[in-house]
Amino acid sequence: MKMRDCLMGVILLLAGGGSDTGLIPAAIGRTIVVAADGSGEFTRIAYGVDVAEPGDTVLVRSGDYWDERFTVDSAVVVMAEQQGQATIWLDPSIRAVILCSEAELRGFVIIGSFMGIGQNMIAAFGDRVVIYNCYLEADARYGSQIVIESQLVPPIIRHCRFDFDFGEPNVFIWHRSPLNVWMPDNCYGDGFTDTTVIHGYVLDRAHGDSTAGYVYVTPVWEEFQWLAAEEPREPRNTQPYIGLFPNPVTSGGMLTLDLPGQPLRPIVLYNLLGQEVYRHSVSNPPNTGGRQVLLTLPSGIPSGIYFANVVTARESLVRKVIVHR
């Protein structure tokens, strides 16, 4: 069943384009050594992964591994011998490292350089996929960048850092099943766009200040307080405006948003898959008192839960929206 799920995930990918005690136990099989300088059994990570059996560890020595692509389709641990000293440079033409059920990736620097619109760095299929102590850098110079794509079950992510250089927007983590309520642990980054969508979550850097290096994580379908990922630097605003109160939409499509200030950019409505369904210009927004914006949603937007992304002079925020037709 797990192999079938993995194969289905690979087909979908090609067609489409916390505590540590919860992690997978250390592999008890053999150790396969990969070294770019030829001092190991193989010089490419893909070659070591190809011969690995469930329970094995592919140990990658320090060095640069260029144009790599590999699929870990069983309970195999692929780990850097020294954390942060083995760098995987992804081939942008073939897009992704694929991790299937119970696969584990540890300690790597992974760079997706000059990758195009909609391409991704890691694809995770099946249950208990672990990404641990990794640094992922995405250069989405030509458009959106999906850093991690998950088709079945969200991966377990621990103590990872994500940096973005270009792109508007960059998609941090994208997952096809928005009902899985999940939040990354210890994930932070520099250079985020104002809002970065994670399959039902929104990352928001403090006051849009790229130097703050601090990311807030907010579930969009429940009324939670903002949750801040661990980061050694203090954010400029430790208590940002809480903007997750349900906003019902009438049968006529009228929506009133209570805001902390006048919106500065178009108000964008997303569904729980992170897909844009409506955009409202703010060149002359209808206003009913300075803190309320009245919108009329098109009849083509069906009933369901959505979230509205709003940018004001104070901060960017998210409003949960419930549409009843």
Image: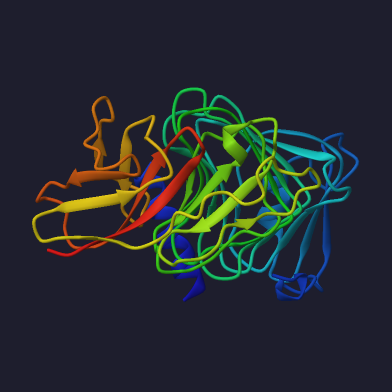
- Depth order, front residue of 128/13: 128
Q: Is residue 273 left or right of residue 215?
A: left
Question: Can you see residue 234?
Answer: yes
Please name the residue shown 37% across and 30% down the image: 265
Q: Which quadrant, please, contains the C terminus?
A: bottom left
Which image quadrant for residue 234? top right
Please name the residue shown 30% across and 50% down the image: 257
- Depth order, front residue of 136/238: 238
Q: Is residue 161 left or right of residue 220?
A: right
Question: Can you see residue 277?
Answer: no
Tally of numbered discs: 0
- Depth order, front residue of 269/283: 283
Please name the residue shown 35% across and 46% down the image: 15
Image position of 274 with respect to 170: above or below: below
Tell me where residue 34 appears, x and y as whole percent.
81, 46
Tell me where residue 195 appears, x and y as whole percent.
49, 41
Which image quadrant for residue 90? top right
Colouring rule applied to residues? rainbow
Tell me where residue 218 appears, x and y as whole percent.
52, 57
Image position of 169 with respect to 272: above or below: above
Tell me where residue 24 appears, x and y as whole percent.
71, 72
Q: Is residue 244 left or right of residue 18?
A: left
Please name the residue shown 76% across and 70% down the image: 20
